[in-house]
Image: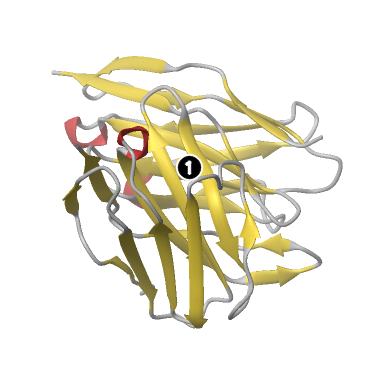
Amino acid sequence: DVKVTQSSRYLVKRTGEKVFLECVQDMDHENMFWYRQDPGLGLRLIYFSYDVKMKEKGDIPEGYSVSREKKERFSLILESASTNQTSMYLCASSLSKGLGSFDEQYFGPGTRLTVT
Amino acid sequence: AQSVTQLDSHVSVSEGTPVLLRCNYSSSYSPSLFWYVQHPNKGLQLLLKYTSAATLVKGINGFEAEFKKSETSFHLTKPSAHMSDAAEYFCVLSGTYKYIFGTGTRLKVLA
């Protein structure tokens, strides 16, 4: 069974702090993704990575950066947390099927981040 | 352009009655389609997937979906709802280098 784990289920940080959200998958998937989920807005893609040290901006990358130094680990970094980054953050991973298409995603349990 | 439309934002059914959650898609090529379920404060769990092998796809927990190319639909059904099915459901299309999510359908199951 694929397992995607996230470092924290709940996190409370202060405005201006640097925040690290960690995601680890154990099935040797090439692709990893970070989403945020907000009521009424659905899931929005922040960044994704299709290989080690590779990253691509998603739909809402502003205020975030990512790091993928090892295949199994994908980190999301909030350089200077702000209250509008209070949200549920979901990590996912998937295999590639070739020609730019992906197989199903496996999601972690989510991190509910509150910035005060 | 590729897109996914979930036709109902909320669906209410009584326990023991059938469930129908509707999803239409738009894609210029044969898509891969998925249904996910999300229980409160949890991640998304894969219910089933369509990848062109068979048009009727069976998933976990008694759910199934039928891919209909002529109608560009991929509706999710279950013969008999259970209280534990109350959750949010997402229809997802695998596009080119990205996934396209529907806006979700919240299923309420009444006792």
- A78 in relation to B77, above or below: below
> Badge 1: few (under 14), some or many (20 or more) residues near its Cα, within 10 Å?
many
Q: Can the viewer see residue A87?
A: yes
The reply to whether residue B59 is visible in this rendering is: no
| The C terminus of chain B - image quarter | top left
**Measured from the top left, where is residue B88 in percent x and y?**
35, 32
The residue lying toward the viewer, choosing from A89 and B32, is: A89
Decide if residue B27 is on the left or right side of residue B41: right
Q: Residue at x 24, y 46 (%)?
A: A112
Q: Amino acid under label 1?
A: Glu
Q: How many marks?
A: 1
Q: Which of the two residues, B46 or A67, is positioned nearer the viewer here?
A: A67
Q: Is residue B96 above or below residue A28?
A: above
Residue at image position (29%, 52%) is A110
To which quarter of the image does residue A100 belong?
A: bottom right
| Left or right placement of residue B77 versus residue A87 in this view | right
Q: Position of residue A2 (x, y in %)?
A: 39, 73
Q: Residue at x 53, y 49 (%)?
A: A46
Which residue extends farthest front? A16
Colour scheme of the rendered structure: secondary structure
Q: From the viewer's side, name the closer residue of B67 and A16.
A: A16
Q: Which residue is mark 1?
A: B64
Closer to us: B26 or B41: B41
Query: Tag 1, which secondary structure?
Result: strand
